[in-house]
Image: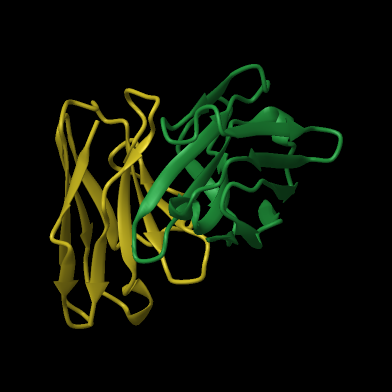
Chain colours: A green, B yellow
Amino acid sequence: EVMLLESGGEVVDLGGSLRLSCVASGFSVGGYAMAWVRQAPGRGLEWVAAISGSGGATFYADDAEGRFTISKDVSKNTLYLHTTHLRAEDTATYHCAKGFDFGDYWFEPWGPGTLVTVSS
Amino acid sequence: IVLTQSPATLSVSPGESATLSCRASQTVGRNLAWYQHKHGQAPRLLIYGAFTRATGVPARFSGSGSGTDFTLTISSLQSEDFALYYCQQYNNWPPLTFGGGTKVEI
């Protein structure tokens, strides 16, 4: 069964850093595009970052550019999101998601998410 | 590309049909997906390519449209269908964009 499970979310101070992880099972992260999508409390889904199947290309929302880094470790079958200079508005549940097929940037499945709370 | 979903909330009774709209600020061709999201759970892909149902999605879910105007129709709503629904475009990006969502409630 293809599954994703995020971890690493916690309460972090304003301006702090955090690394989120997403362990994949049932497929290789090296074969698919992957993405991080977040949902702030009371708000809708917001795309944060994506990485190509080969890992050679990365893409970021304007708000994440320069602060967040998406990467993947094929040997650990894990997707990461390294977040820095965290702001109050980064408080959200962060979901990882698998591209539908190689080169696709619509997503299935998704993980249940990990909660990041940025505290001032 | 901005995606505008309407209505924000749709109140329907079980067994009735629901029609959800997603309008794009510029054409996205047929590069549009629909997701269902229940609180505390992982979002679930329903439709991609504007009208292709994902594996395991019941036939009561159907997508239509192209260009800038899209519709997700849920016929004969079941209790498990009450959730939030989002559209997403992948035609012209970055950024990948989602609509603001439609809540389907009893």
Extreme-top residue of the structure: A56
Extreme-right residue of the structure: A75
Position of A103 with respect to B73 (left or right) is right
Q: Residue A67: x and y, percent? A: 56, 33
Position of A58 with respect to A17 (left or right) is left
Image quarter (top left, top right, bottom left or bottom right) of the N terminus of chain B: top left
Q: Residue A105: x and y, percent? A: 47, 32
Q: Quadrant of residue A82?
A: top right
Q: Residue A64: x and y, percent? A: 49, 35
A17 or A73, which is in the foreground? A17
A100 or A80, which is in the foreground? A80
Residue at the spot 34% in from the left edge and 38% down from the top edge = B97
B27 shown above or below A86:
above
* Residue B63 can be seen, yes or no: yes
B75 shown above or below A106:
below
Number of marks: 0
Residue at the spot 63% in from the left edge and 32% down from the top edge = A69
Q: Quadrant of residue A42?
A: bottom left
Residue at the spot 64% in from the left edge and 48% down from the top edge = A16
Position of B26 with respect to A87 (left or right) is left
* Residue B53 can be seen, yes or no: no
Residue at the spot 48% in from the left edge and 58% down from the top edge = B56
A81 or B53, which is in the foreground? A81
Q: Residue B101: x and y, percent? A: 27, 57
Extreme-front residue of the structure: A120
A105 shown above or below A89:
above
B1 or B14, which is in the foreground? B1
Image quarter (top left, top right, bottom left or bottom right) of the C terminus of chain B: bottom left
